[in-house]
Image (tube, rainbow, N blue to C red):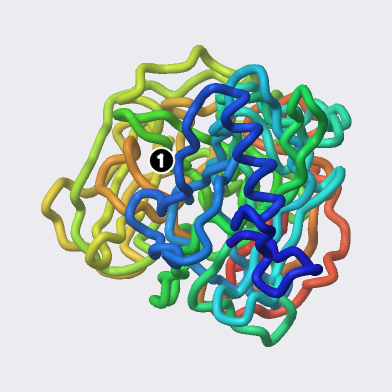
Amino acid sequence: MAERDPRNRTGRNRTGRSPLLRGLAAAVLAAGMLVASAGPGHGVGVPAPASGAQFTPLTAAVLTRPTPFVATDGRTHLSYELLTTSALSTRTPVRLDRVDVRDARTHRVIGSLRGRALAQAANPVGDPLPGADGYTPAPPAPTPTVIQGSQQWIIWLDLALERGRPAPKVLEHRLSGAVLAASGPSAFKETVQVTRTARAAPLNLRPPVRPGTWYSSESCCGNTHHRRGLAPINGRFDVPQRFAIDWYRVGRRGQTWEGDPARLTSYLSYRQPVVAAAGGRVVEVQDGLPDNTPPHAPPIPPIQDTVGNHVTLEVAPGRYLLYAHLHPGSLRVREGDRVAPGQVLGRIGNSGNSTTPHLHFQVMTTAAFFPTDSPPFTFRRFRVVGHVAPRIWDDNLGLQPTGVLPIRRSPYDGLHRAQYPLDREVLKF
């Protein structure tokens, strides 16, 4: 939508073009290229209104249909990505000052990024993500956020709505900033990527492990390798682990390992049973890959061995449960088997791209891990018993001075139903 000139009800001057439109058109012509319109991404958007056309220096697409889910903070969340591309020449950067996510019907802002928050939630596609290794502190992101001409950035959106407020049926994204042309900055505001949110509720599952105390590592939301793992597969981008959770068994003293962290048997998770979180059909099984020796990260395996020994269940149309990094020889099911909720599928190991024994669990939209999309899910019932402040995860768990997690009280301690565990919560199934 073009911004209106407050001096003129129609936003036009004598030439019939708004000052903003003339400024952007001049920047585009100076860059010597045409501007692409902002269209829906991957078929999950809805067409923008045909009226009020304007030059948009940035185009945008979403990588998934945003799906509302309730987390242990009691709030409704929307976590997805905006793939943003500069349509200007390499000589003309764009300063992005603000990203507003709005209800497309009321235009009410439901979430906003600007300043440091925007800088920490946006990065050029292909650039390494600062701090995403889980234990190296991220350096301060540069502000303002400047997107070079012809460059593509990804904006990681993690919105937590006000308690009791439902997610809008349709979202729109309002970008504002300035084109940094040689003649001087030219301010812009543009509405891009109008997209529907999912109406179907997330899968509400039973636990994927036996009763006990478990640490939910690398779950949504924040700068983790699951949440911000952008993967270019078969010619398009996916975030295949967006809502994946790594599960570690926790002992009575808060320990995840005891003894020598270089021994697999020191880890409490090792060879713990994994169980069907819903009834379904086994559609993929891989076995025979050896367990890695902890506590240092192994070489990155071939793409087909990324999730190691694993079981995939189809539990609903277009919904699959992945149980990854299982112990070789422990799998109890075969492709085509029907399984009941709670049935043992195998045991936790350290195969594939895994440093320390844990269960990688997630919902997928395809039977294969690559390519897939990662929708949210919830668990029927669990009790939060604490939170771990430092980022302790697969690659640095065995490098800690001891195996005892620094568990502290959580503001969300207590019983939860039909909710998604947030990152680094300790809970009891």
Q: Is residue 328 left or right of residue 380?
A: left
Give SS at disc 1: strand
Q: Of all residues shown, which one is farthest toward the left?
A: 336
Rendering quarter of residue 393: top right
Q: Of all residues shown, which one is farthest toward the bottom?
A: 164
Rendering quarter of residue 281: bottom left
Quick one: quadrant of the N terminus? bottom right
Residue pictured at 43% horizontal, 76% vertical: 201
- Image position of 85 with respect to 60: above or below: above
Q: Is residue 30 left or right of residue 337?
A: right
| x and y percentages locating residue 93 in the rendered image | 70, 27
- Image position of 293 with respect to 283: above or below: above
Residue ID for mark 1: 324
Along the line of sight, the residue nearer the viewer: 192 or 73: 192
Along the line of sight, the residue nearer the viewer: 411 or 157: 157
Along the line of sight, the residue nearer the viewer: 64 or 425: 64
